[in-house]
Structures are given as C-alpha cells and as structure tokens.
Image (tube, rainbow, N blue to C red):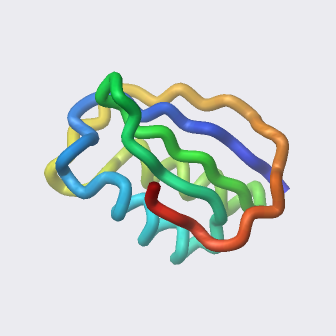
Amino acid sequence: MAAYRYLVQGRVQGVGYRYFALREAEALGVSGFARNLPDGTVEVVGEGQEEAMARFEEKLRAGPAFSQVEGIERASVTPRGAEGFHVR
C-alpha cells in the first residue's frame, strides 16, 4: 500500500480538477480526497496499490481538458485506511 499527498499547481481551480481526480481515483481503486487550498493549488491525498498510485499520478499530471498543470509536489504520507475518494 502506498500513500501520497500531492500539491497541484497551475490553473487547477474552477476547471473541474477535483472531480476529475475523483473519477480517476474511483476508476483506479484509489482512496482519499481532493480539496482546493486558499493559495490556488489543489491538494490531493491518495492511497492504494503502488501501480494504481503511479497511474493516478500520471492522470493528475495530465489533468482535465480545461486545466493547465504547471507542477506537482509529491510527499509520502502514512496510509490511513481511508475508504472511497471524496471532494472536500
């Protein structure tokens, strides 16, 4: 089991990025959440199998059609046993 916190920078608020993350997480069996932060970034915390997390990160780097991802900072976190993926 792998768990990561991603800070996604760029044009990622107001373009459906959190719901994009939700759909991709559900498709890959990743649990966690996505939320907007006051500085204009999106925080995504996810946990799942290592292969699923690698694919999830690829999707986060691509983003939805109207977004423009300029960078992602990734940090390992302790898995919490979260169930499902939520938008906050």
Q: Is residue 85 above or below residue 54?
A: below
Which part of the image, by quadrant, shows the C terminus?
Answer: bottom left
Q: Position of residue 87 (x, y in %)?
A: 45, 60
Residue 76 appears in the rendering: yes
Q: In this view, does 51 lie to the left or right of 42?
A: right
Task: Please state the total of marks drawn on the protein image.
Answer: 0
Front residue of 42 and 63: 42
Residue at 25% across / 57% down in the picture? Answer: 16
Front residue of 26 and 50: 26
Q: Where is residue 78 in the image (x, y as percent from the top left)?
A: 83, 42
Quadrant for residue 70, please give it.
Answer: top left
Residue at 65% across / 64% down in the picture? Answer: 31
Q: In this view, does 68 lie to the left or right of 74?
A: left
Which part of the image, by quadrant, shows the N terminus?
Answer: bottom right
Quadrant for residue 49, please give it.
Answer: bottom right
Residue at 30% across / 29% down in the picture? Answer: 40
Front residue of 32 and 66: 32
Residue at 73% across / 61% down in the picture? Answer: 48
Q: Where is residue 85 in the image (x, y as percent from the top left)?
A: 57, 67
Q: Position of residue 81 (x, y in %)?
A: 82, 62
Quadrant for residue 22, please give it.
Answer: bottom left
Residue 70 appears in the rendering: no
Q: Is residue 14 left or right of residue 2?
A: left
